[in-house]
Amino acid sequence: MAGLSIAGARKNFGETEVLKGVSIDVADGEFAVIVGPSGCGKSTLLRSVAGLEELTGGTIRIGERDVTDLQPSERGVAMVFQSYALYPHLSVRDNMAFALRIAKADIAAIDAAVARAAAILGIEALLDRKPAALSGGQRQRVAIGRAIVRQPQLFLFDEPLSNLDADLRVRMRYEFAELHRQLGTTTLYVTHDQVEAMTLADRIIVLRDGQIEQVGAPRDLYTRPANRFVARFLGTPRMNFLDATVDGDGRGRIGGGHALALPATEQPLAPGTRIAIGVRPEDMAIGNAPDALSLTITFVERLGGTATIHFRSIDADEPLACQSRDDGTLREGETIPVSLPPACLHLFDIDGQAIARKAGE
């Protein structure tokens, strides 16, 4: 195994700059996940690590080796694609063994490697089938098995679950986590699905417009987002935002003149400072409390024991969302009190950067 170091990676397609000086370090044995919206450069970065795209600038090191100019076969990586990329005319066994046979590995070693990978993935009974006879989840296991038999220093996954149905995606997330526990191979995983990122990653790398917005453990990014983009990108439903102005009492005055108590900040906020107040849907509390807002329900999404309640916004184009246990009593058109506990609020300046809280808050 080996770690991965990307320094100042740049990639241009004609006059379009897709990667703008990306630098990432992935520790030996770490499971790192790159997330971001479509077109942000996630797959381009992954393909550059694999050697399928040539960087315009920057370097890539795997372990102690500079692999920036090496061919894909010389990099010690194995990549699993969204489309599986299986050979339809070959059996599962032959698909998994293909790379080793091209490398003219010993037949006994090939058979042992295929048997080991099949056992890890639980696909021993499928080895003589063709891809057409497999389900989507089975094909994905075969594609992963093909990567395992190569015993790479680095696994690269490019949105491997995006073609699967919702139930299978949940099961495969568990299997990816279990696979990493068994093998311990350094992994770089690309997805646009923040649920996959939050459940699988040791560290998340948030990418936007070819640049890194924030890197950190999933919980750290969720509880201490560096800016509004990260705050909004991670979390379902998304974080709510309210525009506010700090008043003379250090409270945040929002639409309708309502004032909210704010968490203590590292540097006091001057009266008149314009800020955005962010609050996660699960942190909004229904019921009377100091500073409670009177909000009108526009829609209730009932999900069994829980519900997402959408409220008419106070001062923004998008409605506010609150997650709560569902006792069946909430009705559309009803106006109810909702409080925003100060300890749960996130503050951002007019440029969208997080305002640091006071130590210990």
Image (cartoon, grey):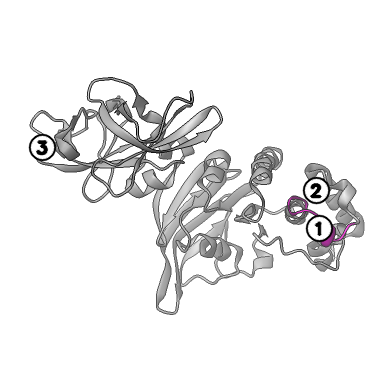
* Residue type of the residue flagged with mark 1: Met
* Residue type of the residue flagged with mark 2: Ala
Numbered disc 1: secondary structure: helix
* Residue type of the residue flagged with mark 3: Ala
Residue behind mark 2: 117
Of circles 3 and 1, the one toward us is 3
Numbered disc 3: secondary structure: loop
Residue behind mark 3: 270
Whether residue 361 is visible to the viewer of this picture, yes or no, is no
What residue range appears in magenta?
Answer: 129-138
Q: Is residue 145 left or right of residue 128?
A: left
Residue 324 magenta-drawn? no
What's the magenta bit mostly, secondary-structure-wise?
Answer: helix
Q: Is residue 289 left or right of residue 114?
A: left
Residue 137 magenta-drawn? yes
The residue carrying pointer 1 sits among few (fewer than 14), some (14 to 19) or many (20 or more) residues within 10 Å by Cα, namely many
Q: CA distance from mark 2 to mark 3?
A: 61 Å
Residue behind mark 1: 96
Q: Report the residue at 52% width, 40% height from top.
A: 198
Numbered disc 2: secondary structure: helix
